[in-house]
Image (cartoon, rainbow, N blue to C red):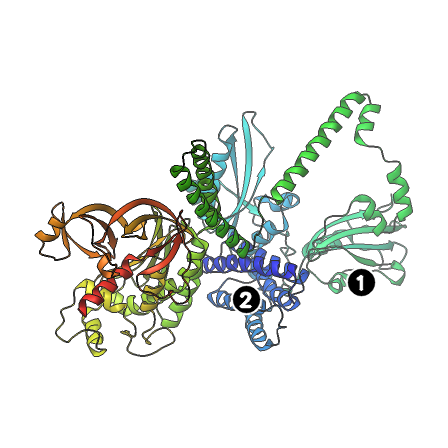
Amino acid sequence: MIDENQESFTEEAGELLAELETSLLALEESPEDPDLIGRVFRCLHTIKGLAAMCGFQEVSAFTHKLESVFDKVRYGEMPVTAQLVTLSLASLDRIRSMLSDANESCDDFEGSVDILSALQALVPAVTVTPASLPFRSTGGIPLRDYLGVMTEYELSRIKANLLQAKKLFSARLHCSLDTLDTQIRDFSAGVKSQGELFSSIPDMADQPGDGISLRFFFASSEDESSLEQKLGVKPERVDAGGCFGLGEAETATNQCAEAREVTYRIRFRSCADAPGSSPDLSELISSLRRIGACQILARTDFLTALGGDKSASCVVSWDITLTTVETEEAIISLFSFVGADGALKIEVADSEAAGDAPKRLGELLVSRGEISPEDLGKGLARQKQLGQILVEDGVVPSIAVEAALSEQQHIKKIHQERQSRDAAASIRVPTHKLDLLVNLVGELVTVQARLGQLATSTSETELLPISEEVEHLVGDLRDNVLSIRMLPIGSTFAKFQRMVRDLSLELGKDVELCTAGAETELDKTVIERLDDPLVHLIRNCLDHGIESKEAREAAGKPAKGTVRLAAAQCGDSVEITVEDDGGGLDREAIRAIAIKKGLVPPTANLTEKDITAVIFAPGLSTALTVSNISGRGVGMDVVKRSIESLRGTIEVSTIAGKGTTITMRIPLTLAIVESLLVAIGTDRFVLPLALVEECVELSRADITRTHGRNIADVRGKIIPYISLRELFRIRGAAPEMQQIIITSVNGERIGFVVDSVIGEHQTVIKPLGRVYRDVPGISGATILGNGCVALILDPPNLLEVAETAAAFA
């Protein structure tokens, strides 16, 4: 059984995998972007850690392997290639598969092994030799002076750029305090346009009093004069010689790509009286500095002369701290002069792989064996606090220290409370609880409507203001609850970037997906039900719409095709368009297939509207062969049914040689919608207000003038209409004056005739029972304030029902 922590992890992992997929696709377009590389690495690192903590050991182990590969990418030891991105996306799919069923242990190791083997094959076994690297002295500002204020990652990016034969620069920028942020932002953007920016550090040398100077470190392929012209500041070359364990005279091959810097603590004794035991320190120091950064300290007042004078007769104990990527064996070889009694001792003081924070002085003394833990405890017990020392020195009165400590405690408390609030700023709520809340609000809206109807029909005057107040509160509650269910549609758009990439490779086409309006919000349920229609439409764009590279170039088009996916809010609906710049719909091909399938007669002359209707017919496909992408005649009919089930509309427009645009109009939510309540006899119906354009009167004289044809003259324009009384076969005579509800259906104005219009209505949508669920023209029901049921009409479907009835009349 899956426990609560594992369920929570599965949800969070889904979000992380979605972010990872988006980052990988962006990384393929910008393979040298360090921010994207870092984002991918962080996602993998988080998934690995959470998976291990929640018991998904297979997921953690698999992700760790992928993370290790991107660790090498992060440190510039291997490049980002299309093959790496493809394998990483396959790894992502594998992780999703491993998470799909928490109760099932992952026994299918073959797929994982294949992916990991392919990834490992991409990892370079050995890096290039130092002879080809630009790490030796180049003159200029020594990078060594700034190593202490740079992070490990910044140094790794510097090293990666140097491995790519890029030049390292530093530029000093003086900023005014009034425009500090703007100057830094603009200058950083300029630097990034010329290369990679690593760090910006305050520069206190010759600091003017009216601002602050910053030193920017960056790498670029440009020369100094070109950079000065583009940046407006003269850059200086930075000398990285010896900073990465690759000195000027070193000619040995770099260590394996797995190597990481290690800091060693080296101790040995030398005696001038012992032949060969007293080294030439200048030679030893040179040898050590060729393999890394080092510090040397003699542990006695009698020092061997640095110039090589070995005449002094003394025993000297040496402490050396060396940071290098070389192995311990390589270091030992430099101390071959130390005899058996020389007490050479080499220990690891710090490791880059461990990632531990630097030890404090007391901890270092204990680890070096200089003092015992008991000695450290006694020393710390006698250690005075800063405030006490300042008071004893007479620098500050004790009351001032107490006031400062009080302020410090207060600020700490505020920070802790602020962090607690931030941590609780958002919560995860299961979807079924949210659905239950929406249903309860829907019931409350219905009860409020009954209360309002009762308040207007009773003589109790005090009830009316209470009813109005309840109506106002229920309205606010409804809007807030529905807004909780609203999500940006961009979460769906992001999924299709991967699909377009994979299909482009499979079809041998170069296609780019452009999106717009990703911030447009829709009800969560609507977004989920849009996935399948959008998948079909985008696949059709790539397979049928976008031409091959050769065909596009022959037509004078760019070789790369474009599919555009956009969303925009229009009132209480959202308009979604899928557009391609392909060849457009082939009318003759569609007509031939439609005749062959018996969908239209051979003599038919299809208009654009007819073609639109035909492509949505079940079984129609213009593909010549059946593939895993298309050719089975299943797709566009599914799209149409899905959009209509959302009470939406779909329109198609096409230009030969230019492309096709498919426009869908979807209501914002499916729970509570604004509707128009109408009456036919004693029955009540509601129509979605989003489709209603206007209402006009229809008298018996108007019907007589048109000789019984269902058309009306509305301000000089002919509007066809459907009599719902006749369509639903409702008994009784129509009133002298009826109403035409003019709606917009598939881009055309269609009227629906009813007896009367009651007014706008907050419609809480209720599903129909199994018997009535598939009745054409009816999409649901709602409960009115008097407890009666009103059917919710579906205008596009009603039009089809009326056209079918007319065809068989």
Vertical arrangement, residue 506 with respect to residue 698, above or below: below
Quadrant containing the N terminus in the rendered view: bottom right
Q: Position of residue 773 (x, y in %)?
A: 38, 65
Quadrant of residue 495 within the rendered picture: bottom left
Check residue 96 in the rendering and tell me which mark sits there, or answer none. 2
Q: Is residue 706 left or right of residue 725?
A: left
Does 460 sit above or below residue 603?
above
- Which residue is at a point 87% across and 45% down the rendered structure image? 302
Q: Name the secondary structure under disc 1.
A: loop
Badge 1: residue crowd in 10 Å (few <14, some 14–19, many ≥20): few
Task: Point out the tag, 1 or 2, that comes first from the N-terminus.
Answer: 2
Which residue lies under the disc numbered 1? 336
Residue 584 visible in the shown view: no
For the image, the number of numbered tags is 2
* Quadrant holding the C terminus: bottom left
Q: Residue furthest front?
A: 459
Q: Is 389 left or right of 75, judged from the image as shown?
A: right
Closest to the camera, between mark 1 and mark 2, is: 2
The answer to which of 371 and 667 lies nearer the viewer is 667
What residue is shown at x 32% (from left), y 62% (from top)?
560
Residue 442 in sight: yes
The amino acid pointed to by label 1 is Ser
The amino acid type found where label 2 is placed reads: Arg
> Which residue lies at the image location 68% right of the left edge and 32% below the top edge?
411
Q: Position of residue 339 (x, y in %)?
A: 86, 62
- For the point 38% across and 56% down, which residue is it? 781
Q: Image height check: is 675 above or below 505?
A: above
In front here: 52 or 691?
691
On screen, residue 131 versus residue 384, left or right, reads: left
Residue 30: image x %, image y %? 45, 56
Determine the CA span between mark 1 and mark 2: 55 Å
Q: Nearer the viewer, residue 775 or 619?
A: 775
